[in-house]
């Protein structure tokens, strides 16, 4: 049996779609969880015949409660790898430790530049000429863990947040399936902050 992947998403779920559209990754995606009932990701999962769960933050008032409920679901489903795809909650230390080395995030900037929730806007406002995409392991600090893959996206003179985020998305949709595949195939080694990809 292959790697069992859970994708956590709050938004429209285009990165989830890219994972579902990848013929190697698709069979691994066992579960999609969202903290937003109206998330497009839940619809995409259902359309693809993947189990989809809405976990209501209102039913789990503290972050620790929510994360424990999430951990329970993931354990029940025997999940090996957790992939954050636009999941807008910060995960507790307990959760992060439970999935250490098996928890990926995608960030729409070249970390450590422009961390946080508004990185596309921040890069534009800074006047940067280049931004990009980072796939990284999640550790206990936000947008901080070891970097698996990174790719630059040039900022063009007439760019606004929408046009720039669209080009960033194109890169994300290529990079994320590749990173998940590498991790699922056991080809990723973490040495301190450095991630090494083992050739197959
Ligand atoms: C992506 O830009 C990702 O980098 C960020 O949130 C966005 C999610 O987009 N973490 P989508 O919901 O996958 O379309």
Image: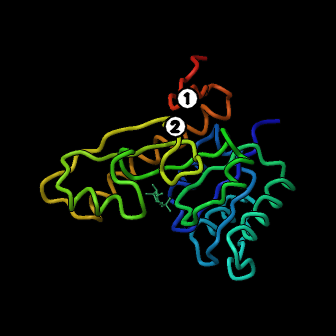
- 77 in relation to 193, above or below: below
Residue 39 left/right relative to 174: right
Residue 138 left/right relative to 30: left
Residue lying farthest to the right in this orientation: 76
Query: Mark 2 CB in 8 Å range of ligand 1?
Result: no
Residue at 53% x, 42% y: name it.
Answer: 145
- Between 133 and 48, the residue placed more toward the observer is 133
SS for dot 2: loop
- 24 in relation to 120, above or below: above
Q: Quadrant of residue 196?
A: top right
The quadrant of the image that shows the C terminus is: top right
Question: How many C-alpha atoms fall within 10 Å of the one at disc 1: few (<14), some, or many (≥20)?
Answer: few
- Give the numbered dot on residue 146: 2
Residue at 59% x, 54% y: name it.
Answer: 84
**Looking at the picture, how far across and down is residue 178, in whole percent?**
53, 36
Residue lying farthest to the left in this orientation: 157
Residue at 18% x, 47% y: name it.
Answer: 129
Determine whether label 2 and label 1 are within 8 Å by CB.
yes
User: In this figure, which residue is indicated by the disc labeled 1?
Assistant: 192
Residue lying farthest to the top in this orientation: 199
Residue 22 left/right relative to 58: left
Q: Quadrant of residue 112?
A: top left
**Looking at the picture, how far across and down is residue 38, in whole percent?**
59, 78
Residue at 39% x, 49% y: name it.
Answer: 170
- 157 in relation to 178, above or below: below
Residue lying farthest to the bottom in this orientation: 58
**Looking at the picture, how far across and down is residue 163, in whole percent?**
27, 60
Query: Mark 1 CB in 8 Å range of ligand 1?
Result: no
The colour scheme used to paint the residues is rainbow
- Give the numbered dot on residue 73: none
SS for dot 1: loop
The quadrant of the image that shows the N terminus is: top right
């Amino acid at each position: 049996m292959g790697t069992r992947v859970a994708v956590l998403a709050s938004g429209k779920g285009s990165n989830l779609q890219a994972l579902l559209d990848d013929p190697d990754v698709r069979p691994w995606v066992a579960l999609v969880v969202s903290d937003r009932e109206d998330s497009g990701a839940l619809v995409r999962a259902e359309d693809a015949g993947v189990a989809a769960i809405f976990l209501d933050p209102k039913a789990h008032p503290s972050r620790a409660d929510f994360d424990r409920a999430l951990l329970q679901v993931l354990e029940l489903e025997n999940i090996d790898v957790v992939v954050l795809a636009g999941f807008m909650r910060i995960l507790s230390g307990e959760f992060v430790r439970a999935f250490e080395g098996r928890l990926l995030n995608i960030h729409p900037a070249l970390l450590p530049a422009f961390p946080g929730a508004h990185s596309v806007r921040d890069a534009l406002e800074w006047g940067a000429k280049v931004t990009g995409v980072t796939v990284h392991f999640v550790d206990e600090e936000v947008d901080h863990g070891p970097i698996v893959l990174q790719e630059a996206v040039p900022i063009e003179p007439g760019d606004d947040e929408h046009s720039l985020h669209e080009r960033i998305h194109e890169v994300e949709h290529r990079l994320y399936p590749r990173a998940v595949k590498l991790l699922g195939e056991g080809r990723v080694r973490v040495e301190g902050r450095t991630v090494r990809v083992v050739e197959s």
